[in-house]
Amino acid sequence: MNAINEVKMLVAKKGTTLTFLAEYLTKNSDKKYSIDTLSKKLRANTIRYSEMKLIAQALDMEIIIQDRT
């Protein structure tokens, strides 16, 4: 699954919108995000880890990297 589909699935699960995420990213970073900018970054898989951490924070989630068992 690519980043855009993953984020859209999580946004729907949490009952929010990409608009909310763009506003949250703008408010909590030093960059301006629009829905278009965010969507382009997700589609092109050029989103940074720091941006994904903010998205997880906005959705009240966390990113976990763990060993496969």
Image (cartoon, grey):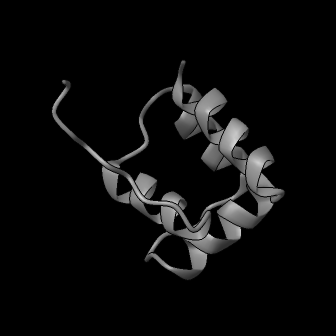
In the image as oriented, which residue stretches furthest toward the top? 1
Q: Quadrant of residue 66?
A: top left
Relative vertical location of residue 27 with respect to residue 64 in this rendering, above or below: below
> How far across and down, in percent of the image, does residue 24 sit?
63, 73
- Which quadrant of the rendered structure holds the N terminus? top right
Q: In which quarter of the image is residue 15?
A: bottom right
Counting labels gives 0
In the image as oriented, which residue stretches furthest toward the front? 69
> How far across and down, in percent of the image, does residue 56 sit?
50, 59
Horizontal side of residue 34 vs 4, given as left or right: right
In the image as oriented, which residue stretches furthest toward the bottom? 27
User: In this view of the protein, which residue sits in the foreground, 23 or 5?
Assistant: 5
Relative vertical location of residue 67 with respect to residue 62 in this rendering, above or below: above
- Which quadrant of the rendered structure holds the C terminus? top left
> How far across and down, in percent of the image, does residue 51 sit?
43, 57
Q: In which quarter of the image is residue 65?
A: top left
Measuring 75% from the left and 56% from the top, which residue is drawn there? 14
User: In this view of the protein, which residue sits in the foreground, 1 or 37?
Assistant: 1
Measuring 43% from the left and 77% from the top, which residue is drawn there? 30
Horizontal side of residue 36 vs 45, given as left or right: right
User: In this view of the protein, which residue sits in the foreground, 52 or 45?
Assistant: 52
Measuring 65% from the left and 28% from the top, which residue is drawn there? 5
Measuring 32% from the left and 49% from the top, which residue is drawn there? 64
Relative vertical location of residue 27 with respect to residue 2 in this rendering, above or below: below
